[in-house]
Amino acid sequence: QSVLTQPPSASGTPGQRVTISCSGSSSNIGLNTVNWYQHLPGTAPNLLIYNKNQRPSGVPDRFSGSKSGTSASLAISGLQSEDEADYYCAAWDDSLNGWVFGGGTKLTVL
Amino acid sequence: EVQLVESGGGLVQPGGSLRLSCAASGFIFRTYSLNWVRLAPGKGLEWVSYTSSSGSTVYYADSVKGRFTVSRDNAKNSQYLQMNSLRAEDTAVYFCARQYGDKFCVTSSCDTYYYFYYMDVWGKGTTVTVSS
């Protein structure tokens, strides 16, 4: 059981907008910023969003993040087939003194 | 090129030991904190350990505390994970990840600010299989 809660799956058709939620608590998301990662099997996880809604260079602006209280969400607009991957939220937990992750959301592009 | 390369994975029997290494290049290693994160088959990412830039501060996930020991050698640009008393549930791909942190000024005068952190560079991982 992951400390952060994400839906196990999400789906959309090309061009659509999808959102993935991430729910935490006062010791993690409530206190610290949320990061989002994209992971394709056999590769290194790729940082998509940090500090609420900042993107590393090379990440398309189709990806955006938001946070409110102890919850966060990742939005992907103009969905493309290459977006099919697993997505994880993460935050530092001040009570556990460690990073906590969501269980991951498998995004399918129909 | 900024890079992290893990090695040392393999097949080990339950109760056995293994030492993973993470070799860094392309950045000033001694100025960054590092983490180990694992991905078990059919599961999600799980944080394993953290070490500060000097190695003086380390944290572990409860699932590995007392069995795993993280260390680093800044002269060799390397991080290590000594894994003892291995269990079947430790079977996973183990990733080394660099941690970056910065200060964000909420106001222009920066009298209100907070720090944010993220893992920005990851290796491709090394596979550990614990099985008899």
Image (spheres, grey):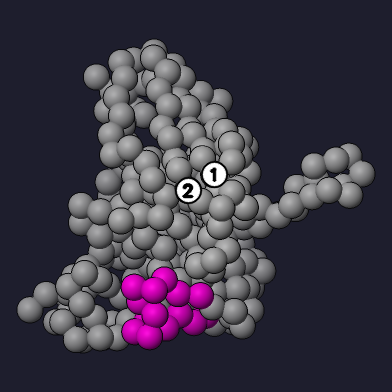
Residue at the left extreme, as displayed: B132
Q: Could you give the CA–CA distance between mark 1 and mark 2, rounded to whole angstroms?
A: 5 Å
- From the viewer's side, name the closer residue of B8 and A14: A14
Q: Is residue B61 magenta?
A: yes
Q: Secondary structure at mark 2?
A: loop
- What residue sits 51% from the left and 40% below the top? A71
- What residue sits 59% from the left and 36% below the top? A68
Cβ–Cβ under 8 Å for marks 1 and 2:
yes
Could you tell me residue B23's position as x and y percent? 46, 70
Q: Which residue is mark 1?
A: A70
Chain for numbered disc 1: A
Dot 1 crowding, Cα within 10 Å, few <14, some 14–19, many 20+ = some
Q: Which residue is mark 2?
A: A24
Position of the C terminus of chain B by quadrant: bottom left
Q: Which residues are magenta?
A: B59-72
Could you tell me the amino acid type at mark 1?
A: Thr
- Left or right for B121, reference B111: left
Position of the N terminus of chain B by quadrant: bottom right
Could you tell me the amino acid type at mark 2?
A: Gly
- Left or right for B66, reference B129: right
Residue at the top extreme, as displayed: A15
Could you tell me residue B72's position as x and y percent? 52, 80
Q: Quadrant of residue A83?
A: top left
